Image: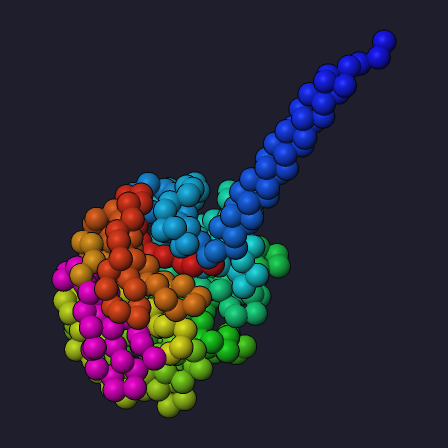
């Protein structure tokens, strides 16, 4: 049976309308996919929460928590592989290093360690993960390829908390709570090769990008000691706030940040003059910190506020506080 011209015309309009609708839907879907892909491309901040046994995942583009990852009983020190595929987190009560697959956002393994692991650092080439072990006064070096301990090095300082690779990966600087020194490990030689006198109870350590200097927060002394790496000695002392502990260095090397735990602030140190040029209020008990790869934002874990403060590094102003889990210990950004 022949259809009327009017029927055909109506059908044509219906087809046209449906086609437009499909194109709109496709465009919307493409836009959403692009936005999702862009979000995934943005760096994420990972925050170990000691009291929650989790890692909070913060999208640094939106400054919102977008996920939580189970990470043992009491996650503390944290580091990331250079390719961004894995996170390494010390689980202190369980004496192990938890391995997190970042694509799946879940734990995929664990490496047995000595008693009370603390700070974690990954070598620039990704071969080793260094873990400070408080009870044994040593640093364990885990081979990333095998997931097993390759070797360990005893250090002089008691109760080491941070073990940080130099930018060239040749040295590891170790700070210990019950000491007034930083111990230096030669990675290739697999032994301690130097001791650098600093203030009482050294905590966080941060290197300039070129590796020429290291900044060491000394909590009880209320100071930041500036270390000449080649000469292996402190060449300047910066008076900080009360109980300085975390250190983060901007990627351009022009500013080093120190968290002042008892004051609830972060201070910015001009690395050319070794003077504090700004102090910014954070949440209660700021601890360890990290800076985005572009250097624009500093993320500060506030241990007693259960939050992360976000600081604009250009204006040295706090942008916001982000609620996270209980007792956040630090931040890593990838």
Residue drawn at x 67%, y 26% is 13
Residue 158 visible in the snapshot: no
Quadrant for the N terminus in the image: top right
Q: Position of residue 67 (x, y in %)?
A: 42, 42
Residue at the extreme top of the image, as rendered: 1
295, above or below 225, in the image: above
Residue drawn at x 80%, y 14% is 3
Prevalent SS, magenta region: strand
Which residue is nearer to you in this view: 298 or 102? 298
Residue drawn at x 51%, y 68% is 123
What segment carries the magenta color? 254-280
67, above or below 4, in the image: below
Residue drawn at x 17%, y 78% is 239
Q: What colour scheme was applied to this rendering of the protein?
A: rainbow
Which residue is nearer to you in this view: 22 or 218? 22
194, above or below 148, in the image: below
Residue 235 visible in the snapshot: yes
* Residue 255 magenta-highlighted: yes
Left or right of 191 on screen, residue 146: right
Answer with the quarter of the image where residue 17 lies. top right
Residue at the extreme bottom of the image, as rendered: 231
Residue at the extreme right of the image, as rendered: 1
Q: Position of residue 274 (x, y in %)?
A: 25, 83
């Amino acid at each position: 049976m022949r259809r009327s011209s009017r029927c055909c015309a109506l059908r044509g309009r219906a087809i046209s309308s449906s086609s437009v609708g499909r194109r709109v839907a496709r465009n919307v879907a493409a836009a959403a996919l692009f936005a999702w892909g862009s979000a995934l491309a943005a760096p994420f901040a990972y925050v170990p929460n000691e009291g929650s046994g989790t890692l909070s995942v913060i999208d640094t583009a939106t400054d919102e928590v977008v996920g939580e990852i189970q990470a043992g009983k009491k996650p503390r020190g944290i580091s990331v592989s250079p390719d961004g595929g894995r996170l390494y987190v010390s689980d202190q009560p369980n004496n192990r290093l938890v391995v997190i697959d970042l694509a799946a956002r879940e734990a995929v393994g664990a490496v047995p360690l000595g008693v009370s692991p603390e700070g974690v650092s990954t070598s620039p080439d990704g071969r080793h993960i260094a873990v400070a072990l408080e009870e044994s006064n040593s640093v364990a070096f885990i081979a990333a390829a095998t997931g097993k301990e390759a070797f360990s090095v005893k250090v002089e300082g008691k109760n080491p908390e941070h073990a940080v690779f130099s930018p060239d990966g040749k040295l590891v600087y170790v700070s210990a709570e019950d000491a007034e020194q930083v111990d230096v490990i030669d990675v290739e030689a697999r032994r301690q090769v130097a001791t650098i006198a600093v203030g009482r109870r050294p905590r966080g350590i941060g290197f300039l990008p070129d590796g020429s200097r290291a900044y060491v927060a000394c909590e009880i002394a209320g100071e930041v000691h500036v270390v000449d790496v080649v000469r292996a000695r402190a060449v300047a002392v910066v008076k900080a706030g009360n109980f300085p502990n975390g250190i983060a260095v901007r990627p351009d090397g022009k500013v080093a940040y120190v968290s002042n735990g008892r004051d609830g602030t972060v201070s910015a140190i001009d690395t050319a003059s070794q003077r504090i040029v700004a102090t910014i209020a954070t949440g209660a008990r700021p601890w360890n910190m990290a800076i985005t790869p572009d250097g624009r934002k500093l993320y500060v874990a506030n241990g007693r506020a259960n939050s992360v403060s976000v600081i604009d590094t250009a204006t040295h102003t706090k942008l916001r506080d982000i609620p996270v889990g209980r007792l956040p210990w630090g931040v890593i950004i990838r």
